[in-house]
Image: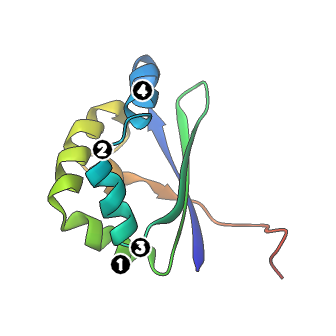
Amino acid sequence: MARYCFCLQVKPERMTEYAQRHRAVWPEMRQALTDTGWRNYSLFLRDDGLLIGYVEADDLEAAQAAMARTEVNARWQAEMAGFFTGLDGRGPDEGFQLLTEVFHLEGK
């Protein structure tokens, strides 16, 4: 299974609310992520609003496309879009920047 890391920028004035929302992710959103191939998904928020995400998936593009076809994802992305800067009209699920892995202890 491939591993992916990405970043986004949360607006500093909305960081507390963003964290609160993620302590109560809707059960149907959690289920949709699982059903569409998102595994070991984590988000980390730095005190300046830098958000780092980590996810494992067989194919991230396929997992993203499958999520995009769900009604719950459309609702979630609409609610989350206002928390971020630099999306240039895209939703958070489309606007994140993938990072390049440069080291993995268990890797070759």
Q: As shown in the figure, which amino acid type bears the numbered disc 3?
A: Gly
- Position in image of residue 25 (x %, y %): 36, 41
Q: Nearer the viewer, mark 2 or mark 4?
A: 2
Q: Quadrant of residue 88?
A: top left
State how far apart marks 2 and 1 are (Cα). Answer: 22 Å
State how far apart marks 3 and 4 are (Cα). Answer: 25 Å
User: Sequence-wise, which precedes: disc 2 or disc 3?
Assistant: 2
The residue carrying mark 2 is: 26
Q: Do the residues under discs 3 and 1 have CB atoms within 8 angstroms?
A: yes
User: Sequence-wise, which precedes: disc 1 or disc 4?
Assistant: 4
Q: As shown in the figure, which amino acid type bears the numbered disc 1?
A: Ala
Quadrant housing the C terminus: bottom right
Q: Nearer the viewer, mark 3 or mark 1?
A: 3
State how far apart marks 3 and 1 are (Cα). Answer: 8 Å
The residue carrying mark 1 is: 62
Q: Quadrant of residue 30?
A: bottom left
Q: Is residue 58 left or right of residue 73?
A: right
Residue at the image point whose x is 33% and y is 60% from the top: 31
The residue carrying mark 4 is: 20
Q: Nearer the viewer, mark 2 or mark 1?
A: 2
For mark 2, give the secondary structure: loop
Quadrant housing the N terminus: bottom right
For mark 3, give the secondary structure: loop
User: Sequence-wise, which precedes: disc 3 or disc 4?
Assistant: 4
State how far apart marks 1 and 4 are (Cα). Answer: 29 Å
- Position in image of residue 57 (x %, y %): 50, 74
The residue carrying mark 3 is: 37
